[in-house]
Each structure stands twice: as structure tokens, then as C-alpha cells.
């Protein structure tokens, strides 16, 4: 299963905000990750619509988390950004499959997708951006 670039940017943005524990400008986040600011702004807008971040305009403004990073499950972020459409068309729409009813492949794919999301449910943004850990965001030498 491959996640879209928007989902990657959303996860990185949330991790960054959890790590710095303050408001940050889109330009700042885009610069840290060397990504397009315009693309990131669209991702931030989607995160605002999903209730995961809020933005404050003007001087002293920026984007910030709406809750503690330890309360944001990675599963929720991925579902908000990706939706759950199924690995193949037949997963959410069994009527498109000529092998239904009783297709074992469809059942296997449903099980695999559920396992993927279950694994994401066990991890929070806080787990991903915890200070003091080696690697990860610490590699970026982010000033807080």
C-alpha cells in the first residue's frame, strides 16, 4: 500500500509541530523538509478541515496542533488524508468482482488493510516526535 505525498507531508507537519511545541509558519516547515510551500499550504488546509491543526493569521501567527501530539493517532491522520477506499476496487465494492460471493482474495485484502490500519492505531504523533530519541526529527537540528 502506497500513501500519497499529501499524507507524507501531513504526517511530517504534525510531527514537526509536536516536536517544536509552538506555532510555526508554513514557510518554516516547508524549508525544514525542503518541500513546496504551496503544496504544504494545501495540506495544512486539509489538516485544518479535519480538526488536527488550527491557523492564526498575521504576525505571530502560524499553524499549531489543536491537541496534544500524544492524542493524535497516526491511523486517524492517514484515514483523514487518504480515506479508506480499499486496496483494490473490489474491497469496498464487492459487486464489481466477478468472483463474489466467496472470493478469498477479497477477504485476504480486507484482512491486510485492517492489519495496516491497526498497526497505525498503536502509534501517536507524540510517539513519532518524542524528544531525546536519536534520529528522526533530531537529525534536522530543529531549533525549538
Image (spheres, rainbow, N blue to C red):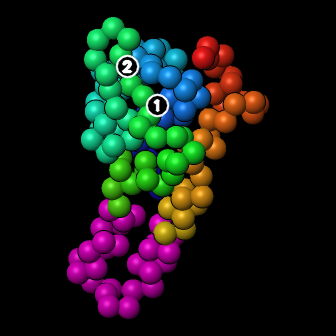
Q: Picture quarter containing residue 104? A: bottom left
Q: Exactly how many numbered labels are in the figure?
A: 2
Q: In the drawing, does residue 43 fall left or right of residue 1?
A: left
Which residue is at the front of the view, 50 or 22? 22
Task: Check contact, mark 1 vs mark 2: CB within 8 A.
Answer: no
Which residue range is magenta in the image? 85-113
Examine the structure image and report whether residue 120 is included in the region drawn in magenta: no
Q: Residue at x 52, y 40 (%)?
A: 68
Which quadrant is the C terminus positioned in? top right
Q: Residue at x 44, y 19 (%)?
A: 24
Q: Does any portion of residue 48 appear in the rendered image?
A: yes
Whole-angstrom CA distance, mark 1 to mark 2, is 12 Å
Q: Residue at x 30, y 67 (%)?
A: 89
Q: Which residue is mark 1?
A: 13
Q: Which residue is most to the top?
A: 59
**Label 2's element?**
strand
Q: In the drawing, does residue 81 fall left or right of residue 117?
A: left
Which residue is at the front of the view, 27 or 57? 57
Q: Residue at x 38, y 25 (%)?
A: 63
- Residue 41 position, x and y percent, is 31, 25
Q: Which residue is most to the left?
A: 95
Please determine whether, in this image, residue 43 is positioned above or below residue 3. above
Other-residue count near label 1 (Cα within 10 Å), few / some / many at <14 / 14–19 / ≥20: many
- Residue 75 position, x and y percent, is 48, 55
Q: Which residue is mark 2?
A: 62
Please determine whether, in this image, residue 4 is positioned above or below residue 29. below
Amino acid at each position: 500500500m502506497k500513501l500519497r505525498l499529501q499524507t507524507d507531508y501531513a504526517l511530517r507537519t504534525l510531527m514537526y509541530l509536536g516536536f517544536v511545541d509552538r506555532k510555526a509558519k508554513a514557510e518554516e516547515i516547508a524549508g525544514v523538509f525542503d518541500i513546496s510551500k504551496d503544496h504544504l499550504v494545501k495540506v495544512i488546509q486539509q489538516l485544518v478541515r479535519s480538526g488536527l491543526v488550527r491557523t492564526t493569521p498575521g504576525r505571530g501567527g502560524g499553524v499549531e496542533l489543536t491537541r496534544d501530539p500524544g492524542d493524535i493517532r497516526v491511523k486517524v491522520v492517514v484515514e483523514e488524508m487518504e480515506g479508506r477506499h480499499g486496496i483494490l476496487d473490489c474491497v469496498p465494492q464487492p459487486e464489481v468482482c466477478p468472483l463474489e460471493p466467496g472470493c478469498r482474495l477479497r477477504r485476504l485484502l480486507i484482512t491486510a488493510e485492517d492489519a495496516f490500519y491497526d498497526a497505525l492505531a498503536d502509534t501517536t504523533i507524540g510517539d513519532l516526535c518524542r524528544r531525546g530519541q536519536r534520529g528522526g526529527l533530531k537529525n534536522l537540528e530543529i531549533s525549538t
